[in-house]
Image (cartoon, helix red, strand yellow):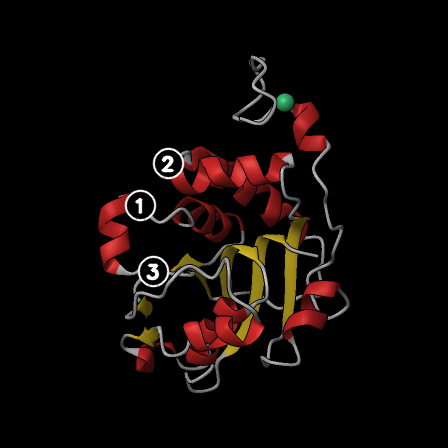
Amino acid sequence: MACKNILTDDEQSICHHCLSELPYTHFLIGTNNLMYQKLSPYINIEGAYSLVYFRKRGNIQEILHQLKYKNHQEIGELFGKIMAERINENKEYPQFDFIIPIPLHPKKYKKRGYNQLTFLCKTLADKLNCSCEENLLIKVKHNKSQTHKNMQERKENVQGIFQLKQPEKFSGKHFLLIDDVMTTGATLESAAKELLKINEAKLSIATLAMVE
Ligand SMILES: [Zn+2]
């Protein structure tokens, strides 16, 4: 999926070489990393984690493109396994109750046919002994692309785009919110603010990649 060489029998989607060459963050999930430092001034979170740094024109951009737009959900499964192993490295970290993917707007979901985060989140839930919950956080507004917007415009663009469905069922739970890439964190912040409206909720955030 990255170098386009033919895989050996024990390789899946991405060859061992390309997988080993990715720009890993080597973060430990929690409060002592760059991801937490970026998000914690705006959101009250227990901890944060990102697996790799996002590099334009690097293999990770190509891999994320295949996952997001080409329906290569096996990439989500592969990275779900890797992320779960890394998250488990912090033995002190509290258990999650629910893994929550950033949702797509129903219209976008219909057009694309899948949420690129579903397989990633289901694998994470399986490996971290909790549940993947796709019906609690819903997207109610279709926002424009964030690509050519500055920080302030991004924040305004994502205000009120998420809502909760039956939040009373989820009091006192610890959620792990998942997205593929964190750029400014505006989308994650907007989703996190909704989840933190839940009575006694605890929230952690993890992404596959983050922009440095
Ligand atoms: Zn390769």
Whether residues under marks 1 and 2 lie with C-beta atoms below 8 angstroms apart, the answer is yes
Q: Which residue is mark 2?
A: 71
Q: Nearer the viewer, mark 3 or mark 2?
A: 2
Which comes sooner in the sequence, label 1 or label 3?
Answer: 1
Q: Nearer the viewer, residue 38 or 9?
A: 38
Mark 2 neighbour class, 10 Å CA radius: few under 14, some 14 to 19, many 20 or more = some
Q: Secondary structure at mark 1?
A: loop
Percent of width and height locating residue 94: 62, 68
Percent of width and height locating residue 36: 68, 69
Q: Nearer the viewer, residue 200 or 191?
A: 191
The label on residue 114 is 1
Q: Amino acid at mark 3?
A: Glu
Q: Amino acid at mark 2?
A: Asn
Q: Secondary structure at mark 3?
A: loop
Q: Which residue is mark 3?
A: 134
Percent of width and height locating residue 158: 42, 72
* Label 1, label 2: how far apart the Cα atoms are: 8 Å
Q: Residue at x 65, y 36 (%)?
A: 58
Q: Residue at x 61, y 22 (%)?
A: 3
